[in-house]
Image (cartoon, rainbow, N blue to C red):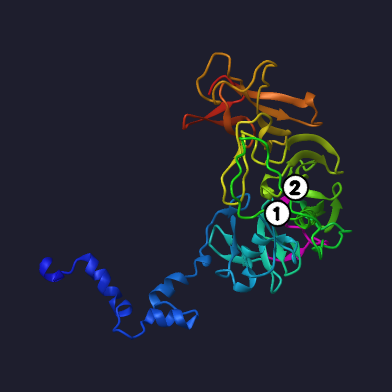
Amino acid sequence: VCRDAHGGRQCQMCIRVSAWAPVGIQAQGEMSAVDRVIQSEQFVSPEAALAEAALAPRWLNVTLSNANADGSRFLDEVGDGPISMERFSAPFHELGGLFVDFRGNRDRNVARRSSVGIDVISARDGSKIAMEVPQRTRVSAATWSPDGSKIAYNVHTPNETHIWVGDAATGRARQITREPVLATLVTSFEWSEDSRSIATVLLPRDRSAMPTPPTVPQGPQVKVAENTDMNRLRTYASLMATPHDKALLEWHATGQLAVIDVERRRATNVGAPAMIRSIDRSPDGLYLRVTTMVKPFSYVVPVSSFGRVEEIWDLEGNVLAKVQDTELNVGVNPGQTPTAPGVGGGAGQEDGPREVAWRPDGQGLTFLEQEARANDEEDDATPSGEEGEEGTRRKDRVMQWTAPFDEGSKSVVYESDRRMSSHRYSEDAQVLFARETARGNVHEFAVLLDTPSEK
């Protein structure tokens, strides 16, 4: 009938049906191939063409993107294919969106997304040098030293993580950490600009035993709803639920900041153990921008929305200045939406420093900050960057903050009538690049700082 209706040819619908007919259409009482597969309750192999496409070794593809300082060599972390069921099913703690491989004291994703080797590829002739990697270990976070001569990387055993440093020209390497690394919140490390030392987070030397769950409930589960109609909470896939979860989180997150001399393999502790979320070393190596997680914890938002404090530390661990203080975000702040892995959200147009970073010339910090509101001024009449009533717009400024990091060492580098969404410097810090966004339009411009009035 189909051929008669279509001039002797089958239509596309009939072609699709006929392709399935040998499997899906069977004589009454006869079991189809699909049914036999389902009832066997076993894994089966697809057709050869599908298997070949699915099992193509895509992990062996090389992207020449991780280059050293002069662009003469590239790094390639060598994979071994899809994650094995053994690694994928390794036990872990789930703590409000943070998944911890508790045997190895690291984020679960570190173990899942690690590699089996590191190749150094010549940009001149494509030749490769394999970095030394201990047998039956995995590696991650391969990072060039600033001078381009050495490579540091994490080496993972089932129970520990250590930092190794190797010679890029020969591939010879050795372990530089004596105490294991704590890779729960901070999964990488920071080189010094002179390539002589590395800042990282280690396990505290006098660490207590991991908290064990109570044999009987310690009390009822209590969740308090905020008395407001401004709550912006969503449904999150992973939240903490008990006091034991809170104790586990603090134990997993508390580590010792340390600076390790690469040549001598000697670690110098910086300050006391803390729940360190990130570290950022200054170009001159004298200061560290350290972000720590702070209490209280919460049962209604993930760990990514917990409070944090960003500070400037010296190498003795003394707090020189507080950069930002972010409170626990439980969804009642109209300027912020709680975040979580795979969930959008984040800060709105709030006051305070934004886009904080070390200047590339080593002259302190750079950040964006809007000028303070007048005493009688409330929120801006219109969203920042849009036209509004006369006098409602505040200037936005690029600031510089130098040692000793007190109020008197802040200065204005550049200011704009519109709120800037991002900024960065040229390597010599003589040219400022900034971006403004208004009504969906992006305006990006450069300013020569010796003539700041010209864009």
Q: Which residue is mark 2?
A: 297
Residue 87 position within the rendered picture, expressed as x and y whole percent measured from the top left: 64, 70
The extreme bottom residue here reads: 30
Q: Which residue is mark 1?
A: 240
Residue 304 position within the rendered picture, expressed as x and y whole percent measured from the top left: 67, 47
Seen from the viewer's position, the closer of residues 198 and 156 is 156
The amino acid beneath tag 1 is Met
Residue 131 position within the rendered picture, expressed as x and y whole percent measured from the top left: 66, 66
Give how far apart the Cα atoms at labels 2 and 1 are. 9 Å
Mark 2 surroundings: few (<14), some (14-19) or many (≥20) residues within 10 A: many
- Left or right: 291, with 316 as reference point: left
The amino acid beneath tag 2 is Phe
- Left or right: 420, with 44 as reference point: right
Seen from the viewer's position, the closer of residues 290 and 391 is 391
- Left or right: 301, with 60 as reference point: right
| Magenta-highlighted residues | 169-194
Q: Quadrant of the N terminus?
A: bottom left
Q: Kindly tell me whether residue 350 is visible in this rendering.
A: yes
